[in-house]
Amino acid sequence: MSNLKRPLESLPTQISAQIMTHIREEGLVEGAHMSAQSLADRFGVSRSPVQKALAQLVADKVVRHEPKRGFFVTGEGLTIASRSDSNDPLAETYLQIADDRLRGELPDVVSEAALRERYDLTQADLRSLLLRMQMEGWLHKRRGYGWMFHEMLTTPDGLEQTYRLRAALEPAILLEPGFRLDPKVLNQLIEVEKRMLDGEIDTASIESLYARGVNFHEALAEASGNPFMLDSLRRVNQVRRLLAYRSMVDRSRYYGQAREHLEILDLISRGSMVEASVAMRHHLGSVMVSLQRIEPLLR
């Protein structure tokens, strides 16, 4: 079990951390089945690193493997996954790097030596942070030397533009003729929102809060059966990540957002898709109003 605290030194180990977050945020129960292919699809990677990550978690007794049946969450895994992620010792540094990038204090291309010196990091901690940022899609390893930051939104106006795009896209997602939200996914989304309202809004890390919102909206896009809509939303969520982190200074607004998510899910469960579409448009409009109120903090 001590292996769970090892540095994230490889892609499979990074994915194993994402699987732990997935177990917690989706409210999985003991004995819940996890498919390597579905996890690969969720994280946007091939099956190979997912299989290796699951093997690591089997060794840590977080999941168990049954031949010809797959992987299942264990009771010990639930105990570990339920722990708050707000105590990550690298969380503050991670957010400082994001903030420095937004402020233009980091160049497009950086060396590992420069990052180690600037943030006073060990090689293992730096590697952990670089892998995490690479998995989240805001930098990549250059051939031969250094790391390059991807293009990200750096102005509040850009963040508002993404919400206007989403206000056009996401209500339409709910009206797609092939829309079907799996009942299990529906129940998982409901449980996540209920846990948020029960206090996790105040205790979860801002990265986790962002991931939960992204998971909610992308799950609905996936249920549309329209891969172009899902791809468009994923691209928007990737480029808005850093500004979205900064906008999370006011956690109180997430209580209203969680209640609105539950309202949308309730309408979907009753097959009231037109009403759900209207509720989604209202929800995204409310978020834009909230962003306008805190815009000075984003500059």
Image (cartoon, rainbow, N blue to C red):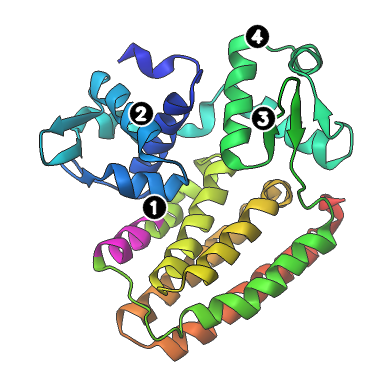
- For label 3, the residue is 94
Residue 5 seen in render: yes
Q: Secondary structure at mark 3?
A: helix
Amino acid under label 2? Answer: Ala
Sooner in the amino-acid sequence: mark 4 or mark 1: 4
| Residue nearest the viewer, comparing 23 with 197 | 23
Which of the two labelled residues, at mark 1 and mark 2, occupies the earlier sequence position?
A: 2
Answer whether labels 4 and 2 touch (C-beta < 8 Å): no
CB contact under 8 Å: marks 4 and 3: no
Type of amino acid at the residue the image marks with label 3: Tyr
Give the residue type at disc 1. Answer: Arg
In the foreground, 32 or 133: 133
Q: Mark 2, mark 3: which one is toward the viewer?
A: 2
Q: CA distance from mark 4 to mark 2?
A: 24 Å
Magenta region, main secondary structure:
helix
Residue 184 on image: x %, y %:
25, 62
Circles 2, 3 touching at the beta carbon (< 8 Å): no
Report the span colored magenta: 184-192
Mark in the foreground, 4 or 1: 4
Residue lying at the far top of the rendered structure: 122
Quarter location, residue 29: top left
Q: Residue at x 49, y 52 (%)?
A: 212
Q: What's the residue type where badge 4 is placed?
A: Thr
| Residue beneath disc 1 | 195
For the residues carrying marks 4 and 2, which lies nearer the camera in this image? 2
**Residue 219 placement (x, y as % from top left):** 43, 63
